[in-house]
């Protein structure tokens, strides 16, 4: 492997020796590019009482599928734990393991657009597509496909998330209600399996393995080195809506939740809208919604009745600031030059010499280097929005909000999508996603920290208190309404029924595929498909 095989430098070790270096390190970790460019670091530093980021024994900075195959042969021969990392965003610690051989795909970043792609051996009609190597980040892909190419590819919302890991978990972006999941767009993949074979899989060649890569879990069936995804017509506009509404009392907040659900069911349950409705302590409803395909004026017309309804009761509801609605030409949406002109929208890699296109959403800064205290999710079926069931849903959300904040990710549920999107969602994910209007997420986290570093240790007592509140919130929700499974990329480390929660009826098929391609369990992650079932 030559210089591609490297020892893993470990900044945490420097912290223990040099307080000044430690202060510099913990200041730098709020930059996700700093974390992603370091093979020994992950975007989340750990989860209290679950896992802690640990250094690998060595890292292979892979540049080809041949490099990966060599690493797998070596790991098998010497009985080494093998770990795969692209973007390093695994909440459950799948991107690292102490003493392991780490296959790091970050150097594999080529992106190629196709006007007419046909998978190998297929007689399917050619379609526009993009081939992406496994180490690319979604911000890089959006710039190439959307800004430069004038097409759309379904990827993740975070600009620093790795392409391969997101697709293998299922993959939601801000506009999934219009374009489906990233997994549903997967046409072909190059993967190195446990026998060190480099395989090209598609719907004709080894279709079962292709199915497993569409939501069966990253780092489970092999090391993906290249993916080809269908692209779509780029809508004329993309944009967002930001607003905060404060209710004067718990009673008013319960009414606000009901008003929001009615407005959503009647006006937003369609391909134009996505992203988050957040219920916060202090009787606060916060909106950070995405939009696609609507002009500024059209988007304002959609929301005007809702604003007017709330403003009619100033004693019950108030806006700390005017709501913001922004619709821009779609080719500008991921253009760093344009985004840097908008105050407070993006931040950049602040290291000397960093390219100006290295941007990330400002709202993601607090998640870089985070320590998770708790995290749970569940799909909410669209049937809960029926008029006769809407009050029960409002009661459940209100009860949960008395315990902790929670957010409805309306882009992470395919109810309201076009029929073509819903049918294409027959992936390895839990089928509940196809009939859900949102994924409800309830979590808690702390700032960057690490055990044994004076002044930078996790607040374990606070973490356990937060975890208890999150459990209470989700219990209050589930006691009052039925919920579906959970999204494996954003789920509870301690989920007791994870096989059913993540994959539902697809779990049995995925287990059989695992037995066929990795019978000895070369690729093992927490709550991953196992050959033994």
Image (spheres, helix red, strand yellow):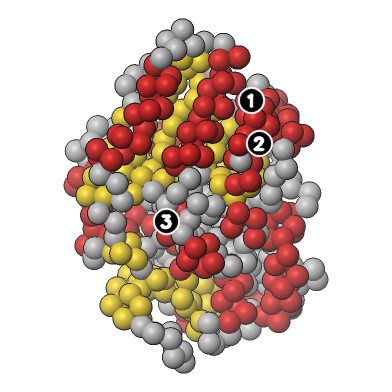
Can you give x and y, in whole percent of width and height, for residue 269 in the image? 48, 45
Q: Which part of the image, by quadrant, shows the C terminus?
A: bottom right
Q: Which residue is painted at 42% across and 10% down in the image?
A: 314
Viewer-side residue, 300 vs 2:
300
Viewer-side residue, 135 vs 211:
211
Q: Which residue is mark 3?
A: 178
Instruction: Classify residue 295 as left or right of residue 231.
Output: left
- Helix, strand, or loop for circle 3? helix
Q: Which residue is painted at 41% across and 14% down in the image?
A: 312
Question: Gap between marks 1 and 3, in whole Å?
Answer: 29 Å
Query: Which marked residue is nearer to the observer: mark 1 or mark 2?
Result: 2
Q: Which residue is painted at 47% across and 71% down in the image?
A: 186
Can you give x and y, in whole percent of width and height, for residue 308 in the image? 37, 21
**Mark 3 neighbour class, 10 Å CA radius: few under 14, some 14 to 19, many 20 or more:** many
Viewer-side residue, 83 vs 405:
405
Can you give x and y, in whole percent of width and height, for residue 79 in the image? 70, 73
Q: Which residue is mark 2?
A: 388
- Helix, strand, or loop for circle 1? helix
- Helix, strand, or loop for circle 2? helix
């Amino acid at each position: 492997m030559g210089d591609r095989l490297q020892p893993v430098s470990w900044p945490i070790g420097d912290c223990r020796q040099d307080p000044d270096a430690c202060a510099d390190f913990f200041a730098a970790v709020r930059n996700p590019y700093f974390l992603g460019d370091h093979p020994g670091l992950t975007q989340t530093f750990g989860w209290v009482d679950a896992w802690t980021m640990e250094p690998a024994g060595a890292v292979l900075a892979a540049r080809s599928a041949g490099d990966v195959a060599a690493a797998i042969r070596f790991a098998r021969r010497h009985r080494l734990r093998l770990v795969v990392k692209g973007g390093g965003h695994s909440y459950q610690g799948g991107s690292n393991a102490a003493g392991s051989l780490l296959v790091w795909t970050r150097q594999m970043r080529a992106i190629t657009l196709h006007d007419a792609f046909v998978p190998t051996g297929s007689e399917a009609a050619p379609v526009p597509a993009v081939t992406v190597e496994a180490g690319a980040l979604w911000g890089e892909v959006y710039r190439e496909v959307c800004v430069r190419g004038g097409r759309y590819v379904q990827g993740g919302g975070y600009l620093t998330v790795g392409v391969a890991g997101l697709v293998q978990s299922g993959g939601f972006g801000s506009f999934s209600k219009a374009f489906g999941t990233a997994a549903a767009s997967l046409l072909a993949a190059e993967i190195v399996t446990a026998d060190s074979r480099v395989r090209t899989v598609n719907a004709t060649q080894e279709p079962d393995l292709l199915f497993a890569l569409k939501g069966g879990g990253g780092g489970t069936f092999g090391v993906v080195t290249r993916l080809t995804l269908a692209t779509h017509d780029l809508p004329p506009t993309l944009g967002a809506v930001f607003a905060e509404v404060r209710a004067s009392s718990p009673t008013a907040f319960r009414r606000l939740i009901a008003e929001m659900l009615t407005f959503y069911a009647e006006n937003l349950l369609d391909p134009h809208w996505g992203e988050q409705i957040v219920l916060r302590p202090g009787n606060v409803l916060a909106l950070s919604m995405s939009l696609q395909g609507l002009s500024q004026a059209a988007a304002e017309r959609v929301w005007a009745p809702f604003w007017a309804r709330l403003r009619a009761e100033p004693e019950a509801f108030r806006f700390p600031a005017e709501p913001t609605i922004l619709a821009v030409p779609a080719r500008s949406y991921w253009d760093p030059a344009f985004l840097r002109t908008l105050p407070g929208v993006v931040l950049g890699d602040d290291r000397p010499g960093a390219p100006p296109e290295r941007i990330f959403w400002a709202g993601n800064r607090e998640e870089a280097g985070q320590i998770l205290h708790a995290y749970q999710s569940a799909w909410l079926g669209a049937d809960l929005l029926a008029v006769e069931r809407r009050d029960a849903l409002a009661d459940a959300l209100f009860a949960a909000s008395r315990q902790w904040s929670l957010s409805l990710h309306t882009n992470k549920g395919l109810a309201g999508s076009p029929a073509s999107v819903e049918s294409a969602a027959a992936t390895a994910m839990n089928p509940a996603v196809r009939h859900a209007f949102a994924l409800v997420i309830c979590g808690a986290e702390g700032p960057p920290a690490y055990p044994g570093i004076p002044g930078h240790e996790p607040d374990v007592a606070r973490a356990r208190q937060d975890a208890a509140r999150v459990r209470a919130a989700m219990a209050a929700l589930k006691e009052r309404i039925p919920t579906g499974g959970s999204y494996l990329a954003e789920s509870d480390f301690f989920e007791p029924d994870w096989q059913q929660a993540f994959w539902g009826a697809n779990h049995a098929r995925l287990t059989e595929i695992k037995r066929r391609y990795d019978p000895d369990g070369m690729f093992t992650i927490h709550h991953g498909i196992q050959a033994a079932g």
